[in-house]
Image (tube, rainbow, N blue to C red):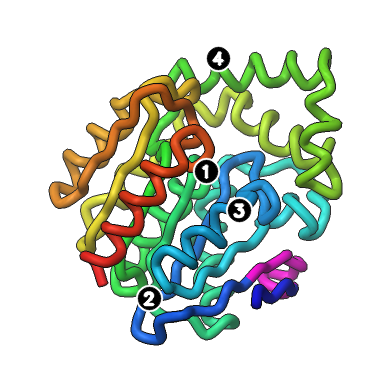
Amino acid sequence: MSEHGTAIVDGRRLETLWLPAKNGSAPAIVMLHEGLGSVAHWRDFPARLAARTGCGVLVYSRYGYGNSDRLAEKRPVDYMHREGQVVLPALLEQMGIARPVVLGHSDGASIALIFAGKFPGAVSALILEAPHVFVEDVSIESIARARTTYQTTDLARKLGRYHAHVDETFWGWNDIWLDPRFRTWNIEEYLPAIRGPVLLIQGEDDEYGTTRQLEAIQARIPQAETLLLAHCGHAPHRDQPEATLERMAKFIESAA
């Protein structure tokens, strides 16, 4: 049975969800959500992944997201670095999880790369959906459009299904990505240290990034495998759930 809970990490209360393992020898999977994601925003995908793999699955909402503590300040340019170097390792220690498969989507994939590059021995494998390691024009253009959409449509109401403090969540994400200082954000320096199996998944129609991101990662992590999905946007687990689930499950089985 799934276990909803909270953890205090880096002085913040974080919402957590633990799906117990059915296979005691399988590695745990830790899921890191996208820039506007949360525990609830993954919908039923964590449960489906747990059922398909037998792995225990930890899902959590980062500070400022979901039912975690409300964001009380503007995000700094290095906010993903703190998540990967301070928050995630502390949370794993608190939860008693060692060498998990880290599955990240978008911002979560970037945090996973920072974590794995900083602590190479702490990860058994990486699964990265729509990762970004530098800032592209297409990302900024799409995030600028999201700002207009939020101001002119009912997007706030829709996001409110997944976040307790929706305005702070949206603007915390949108403002830092559109801050001119963020254009130089780059995490490619973390990639060469990563040694374990890596699976990259991206949609051909991803509105927030191009395959240049995958190429940059593969250039520095030669063992990385790639799945590029047709008729798929920024969220493969939502746009192509069956193909995404099956490929992830096979990758985890082979990595284990």
The label nearer to you, 2 versus 4, is: 2
Above-or-below relation of 179 to 197: above
Indicate the secondary structure of the residue bearing disc 4: helix
Foreground residue among 192 and 14: 14
User: Which one is earlier in the sequence, the residue at label 4 or at label 3?
Assistant: 3
- Location of residue 100 in the rendering, given as x and y in whole percent from the top left corner: 40, 72
Q: How far apart are the alpha carbons under marks 1 and 3?
A: 20 Å
Residue in view at x 78 percent, y 25 percent: 155
Picture quarter with the N terminus: bottom right
Q: How far apart are the alpha carbons under marks 1 and 2?
A: 23 Å
Q: Which disc, if any, is residue 44?
A: 3
Q: Which disc, if any, is residue 141?
A: 4
- Location of residue 241 in the rendering, given as x and y in whole percent from the top left corner: 46, 42
Quick check: 164 left or right of 226? right
Q: Check disc 2: other Cα within 10 Å, few if <14, some if 14-19, many if 20+.
A: many
Q: Check disc 3: other Cα within 10 Å, few if <14, some if 14-19, many if 20+.
A: few
Q: Magenta residues?
A: 6-17
User: Which one is earlier in the sequence, the residue at label 2 or at label 4?
Assistant: 2
Which residue does the numbered mark 1 point to in the structure image? 107
Which residue does the numbered mark 2 point to in the structure image? 27
Residue type for callout 4: Glu
Indicate the secondary structure of the residue bearing disc 2: loop
> Mark 2 near mark 4, Cβ–Cβ under 8 Å?
no
Residue type for callout 3: Asp
Q: How far apart are the alpha carbons under marks 2 and 4?
A: 38 Å
Picture quarter with the C terminus: bottom left
